[in-house]
Image (tube, rainbow, N blue to C red):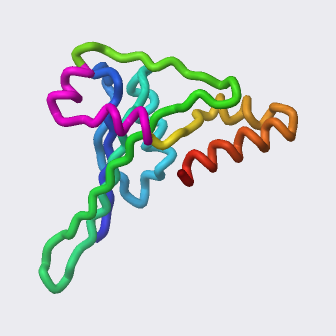
Amino acid sequence: ENFSASGGSASSGNSGDVSMHGYATQEEEAQMRYEKMRAATSFLVVQVGICPFMWDTKKRTYESHPFNFYVYPRDCRGLDRRFLSEARCISFLSNGGFDFNKLFRSGIPFLNHEQETQARSLDPHKGASFIASLRADLAA
């Protein structure tokens, strides 16, 4: 049986009682995983990891293919977001080899649901231009 695992690194170590790591099966949609991760912290998720596992019937073992993505909300068209962090979390990430330059220079831009709603409610020309600028950031 094939399955995937996902996890995230946040700018805070305070994840409450909701695990930031876990398995996503067919019964658990990606949106549900996002909601669990989002509920776990009021701080930003700065890295998302996804690892699909596929069963190799010939080798009778699982093969894994991990992917990690730096994610960082950019200031765009007046929508800005605070970047809050805890010193102990920054130390933990730094000691683990986390690349802050990569995060800030080339992290994948994103909008949360509230920001997306706000962007879409802008005048149609401004809203379209805002979405186009995000797409351009992603393509760069």
Residue 27 pos. (x, y %): 43, 56
Q: Which residues are magenta?
A: 89-106
Nearest the camera: 23 or 9? 9
Does residue 19 appear in this view?
Answer: no
- Does 126 sit left or right of 76 as displayed? right
Is residue 33 shown to the viewer in this render?
yes
Give the x, y percent position of residue 75: 59, 27
Residue closest to the far bottom: 58
Rendered residue at 38%/33% (across/down): 46
Residue 44: give x, y in percent of width and height: 43, 26
x 44%, y 42%: residue: 106
Quadrant that contains the N terminus: bottom left
**Residue 75 part of the magenta-drawn span:** no
The quarter of the displayed image where residue 115 is located = top right
Q: Looking at this view, is 129 or 38 the one in front?
A: 129
Q: Is residue 86 above or below residue 19?
A: above
Q: Residue at x 32, y 55 (%)?
A: 67
Which picture quadrant has residue 119?
A: top right
Instruction: Give the residue drawn at x 38%, y 36%.
Output: 103
